[in-house]
Image (cartoon, grey):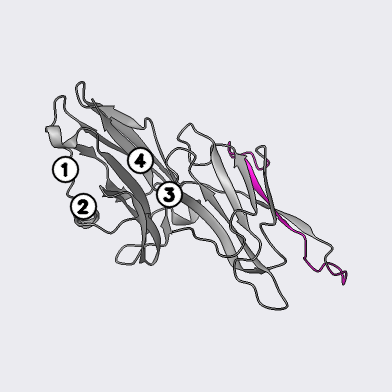
Amino acid sequence: DLPGTRDFGCSVAGVDDLDGDGVGDIVVGDSRAESSPNNLYGAAWVFSGRTGAELFSVSNNFVGGLGFSVGAASDLDGDGRGEVLLGAPFVLSSGTPNSGAVYVYSFHPYLTTSAQSISASQGGLIQLDLDFPTQHAGDSYAVLMSDQGPGSFQWGVEIPLSLTPLVLASWRGQYPQPLSFGMHGVLDPFGDATAFTGLFASPPPRLIGRTLFFAAIAYPQGGVAEAASIAVPVEITQ
């Protein structure tokens, strides 16, 4: 189902690779996502250019037709990723109706991988790099896994995976891959951690051609998740 309503797709633009998978992504606007007779509450979504999965969204009942126009900017904040530009032409500014504004949004995936696929015939390891904001330094983390694609469920925050038995098993530290290291732990003083997942050569044939999705969460010990990464796909090829 499309996330927008009346004007979903009124603006579309290609943007830089925001999720770190090597493929540019797409931003889509909807200037009337939640409209009333007197106001335009706009919204915008960023989708993966590789999988089509939703990466980020901006809404929050934003008055002013946010998403009427969308665009991309080069790396403005020095984090190595481009930014997304969202136009809101009907914003009231300094008492002037419809004076308009452009808002700059910087997104961070919090999870990147060293590769997007593993060869079943050769086996191998993929490195997963977690990079949460420093406010989560010292928090616990877990890398969750789903075999049914990206989705959404709530556990403190929205986690972008389909809630499956595999997600629950990975929360308990149980992974189908025999090579999985550092998938649970504590974030360092910078909010970072490194994990690994992989396969021995010639795994069971049922795994070949499947795509697994990973998402990392950060949570205080004994608490619920306070931050979640995007869902990152890893395909098991021949």
Q: Are marks 3 and 2 in contact (CB under 8 Å)?
A: no
> Which quadrant is the C terminus positioned in?
top left
According to the picture, the residue beneath numbered tag 1 turns out to be 176
55 or 33, which lies in front? 33
> Residue at the location (63% across, 43% down)?
13
Q: Amino acid at mark 1?
A: Pro
Please name the residue that numbered disc 3 is placed on.
230
Q: From the viewer's side, name the closer residue of 141 and 233.
A: 233
Residue 214 is a magenta residue: no
SS for tag 1?
Answer: loop
Give the residue type that dot 4 points to. Pro
Q: Residue 105, image x and y in percent? A: 63, 51
With respect to residue 12, does 223 lie above or below? Answer: below
Residue 150 placement (x, y as % from top left): 36, 51
Q: How much space separates mark 1 and mark 2, taking CA atoms?
A: 9 Å
Residue 88: in magenta span: yes
- Count neighbours of disc 1 (C-alpha within 10 A) and say few if under 14, some if 14 to 19, many if 20 or more: few
- In the picture of the structure, the residue carrying the numbered disc 4 is 233
Which residue does the numbered mark 2 point to in the structure image? 166
* Alpha carbons under labels 2 and 4: distance apart: 15 Å
Which quadrant of the view contains residue 36? bottom right
Q: Is residue 198 above or below residue 2?
A: above
Report the magenta stretch's main SS: loop
Gap in Å between the C-alphas at discs 1 and 4?
16 Å
Q: In x, y percent, where is residue 31?
A: 66, 62
The residue sitting at 58% across, 58% down in the picture is 8
Q: Residue at 35% across / 49% down in the picture? A: 215
Instruction: Judge the density around disc 4: few (<14), some (14-19), many (≥20) Cα neighbours within 10 Å.
Output: many
Q: Which residues are magenta?
A: 76-97
